[in-house]
Amino acid sequence: MEEEAIIRKWEDLDIDVLVKIYQKIDIFDLTSGVAEICKTWHHAACDPMLWHTLDLSVMSSNYIRTPLEPYVYVDGPSDEKLTKILKISLNLSRGSIKTLIFNINLYVHDEQLTYTAERCPNLKRLVLPAWNRIKKTGICKAIKMWKDLESLTMPSIETPLYFMEEVSKNCKNFSELKIMGPCDIFLVNTLIRCVPNLKVLSLRCSVVYLDALILILDGLKKLNVLNISHCIIVDAPPPDATIKVVTKLDDSVLEKGSRLSEFLTCMDDECIMCQRTRADEGLLRWYRYEQGLWKQDEVKSLAV
């Protein structure tokens, strides 16, 4: 007599096996309802191993540019999709998220950002999206909740003082910063004042004023790594004079840079990224280029 086949139910699947399966799927599949199939699957979907990083770099908003603030219009379904994914992810993660990555073209609004901050109290690394729909009150409220923040990647900001002041007051272990926008003397003075213990700074693919670069090298005493690869270095002249683009760093700047553990530069006419920075006048329009190009950085800890 043949033995009867043993039939196992899906809910009897080993949790460790489920977690390994979940690690292979993307955020869309993980938040599509698999956690609601049964208690075992839900328990596996809450495993901290799945939620060390919440990577939303694969998401971007469906938007059109507008002439008035916030200069973009995001359609309703796009906003609703982001809100849904955030709510499900943050519910499943149970405060386990240490790294949060937004797409640079994901236009998050204040409520979405603060909702996320409230449910990610242990965040250590943040890659911010575009600022357009984030107001001063929203970002300051979020930063106050991220006491453990150590690393930040942010787009260009017109008034960095209030933002960096919040980082200074609330994020005592902050040590790593990437700014995807122009760097002038005001910005550097803000950094020296607010985050004097900064160890890593990347300004790649941006406009950097020469006096600001020198002040970085002289004023950020704890700095170990500086990345100015593919930047346009501008020597700011007196008023009404012609702006001078520096094509080669002089020996005095290089000598200052040699004191760092890493001083990363690239000003090569043959370099594609240098060419793109110049074509876009120091503020790269990332949507023009290969998908995900904005994620790159010569500093390994800042690459996405």
Image (cartoon, rainbow, N blue to C red):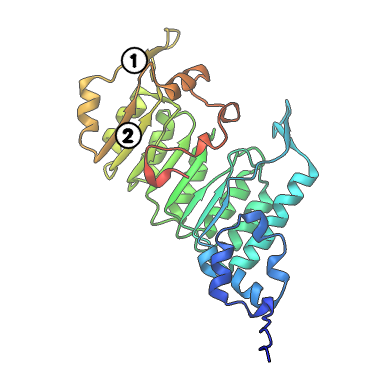
State the mark number for residue 247: 1
Mark 1 or 2: in front is 1
Residue that lies at the very extreme toward the bottom in this rendered image:
1
Tell me where residue 193 sits by quadrant. Answer: top left
Residue that lies at the very extreme toward the front in this rendered image:
1
**Alpha-carbon span between mark 1 and mark 2:** 19 Å
- Residue 150: x %, y % from top left: 42, 53
- Say which of 31 and 75 sits in front: 31
- Say which of 216 and 129 sits in front: 129
Mark 1: secondary structure: loop
Tell me where residue 128 sits by quadrant. Answer: top right
Mark 2: secondary structure: helix
Please tell me whether residue 183 is drawn above or below residue 192 in the rendered image: above
Packing grade of label 2 (10 A; few <14, some 14-19, many >=20) is many
Residue at position x 69%, y 79% in the image: 9
Residue at position x 68%, y 92% in the image: 1
The residue pinned by badge 2 equals: 216
